[in-house]
Amino acid sequence: MIAATLPLAAIALLGALLRHFNPAMEQTRQAINKLVLYVLLPALVFRTVMESRLDDLFLQIPLVAATGVLGCLALGFLVFHFLPIPGPTKGAMMLGAAFGNVTYLGLPVLLGVFPGQVEQVSEVSVLFEITKSSLNLTLGAMIAIGYGSQEPITLRNTLFEALKLPPIWALAVSIAWKASGIPCPALVLDTASILAVTVSGLMMLSLGMALRFKPTRLMALAVPVAIIKLAVSPLIVFAATGPVGLGGLYGTAAVLEGAMPSQLLSFIIAGKFKLDEETLAFVIMVDTILAFVTLSVVRSVLAG
């Protein structure tokens, strides 16, 4: 695990240094994120589905991922809702504790830990991403509205936000194509594969460029968020793998995905719906750094 995460940490550090010495790199980071979201990640989703089997995994993995999110959201509510802190901070901490960075960090980690099982771990990462991002853009947005902007909550609007995710459309197209039995031209698969292999490096570079240090009096909230996201979340996911029959490599990869730090999409949602962005940014930075240690612990426990 250390050998797998050190290169990723180095890339993230490079991104952080670029951001520190050249604040204008924020525009570059946003451009990278759009490129990943609209081109590279859909290519990865398409390739992964086309090279996979449409079997029970397409139900098991999303069920496990959703269980982890909902369990952490419930715990986050119990921890943060009753604390004497501002409402926007409560909502931001709930999002930070529930939604994990399963592709920007999760995919590179899984590829480093299981270099010989690229297709299998990519499948886990893709299905986790589709599940978590969809929940974050719907349920997470509702929480953000309730604690932040307090706009009228409509299911139509939140579902519309989720459907705007290009990876979801790539998933739908690839599943339909796969189910049709029509062979996918080698040119299409090769193109998608070339685009897909660039995802990990760019994701880690963007992650490093997104980390900001701006301490506030609420920075201590990073501790309960990290405990929920880095320790409790993998336990919930592990407990969920048994009932759905997810074991072996897929089960191990799912638990590692459950142990990933806070999702950067939560920061975007926080900004859109007037949650506490500053504290959430600090929390994401802290638990992302801690994750390079806790992931090794989770991996060791699973291996033992």
Image: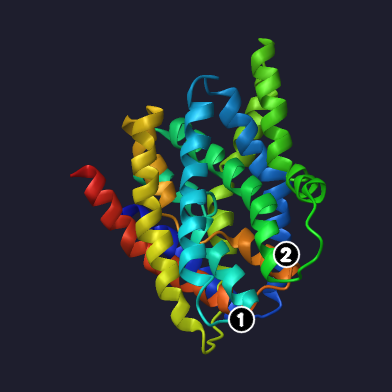
- Residue 86's tag is 1
- Residue 280's tag is none
Q: Residues within 10 Å of mark 2 (few under 14, many from 20)?
A: many
- Residue 145's tag is 2
Q: Is residue 281 above or below residue 126?
A: below
Label 2 SS? helix
**Residue at the spot x=53%, y=27% of the render?**
58
Task: Tell me where residue 242 appears, x and y as whole percent.
Answer: 34, 33
Quadrant in the picture for residue 277: bottom right
Task: Tell me where residue 289 appears, x and y as whole percent.
Answer: 42, 69
Say whether residue 198 is visible. Answer: no
Say whether residue 282 is visible. Answer: yes
Q: Is residue 97 above or below residue 199?
A: below
Label 1 SS? loop
Q: Residues within 10 Å of mark 1 (few under 14, many from 20)?
A: few
Q: Is residue 242 left or right of residue 263?
A: left
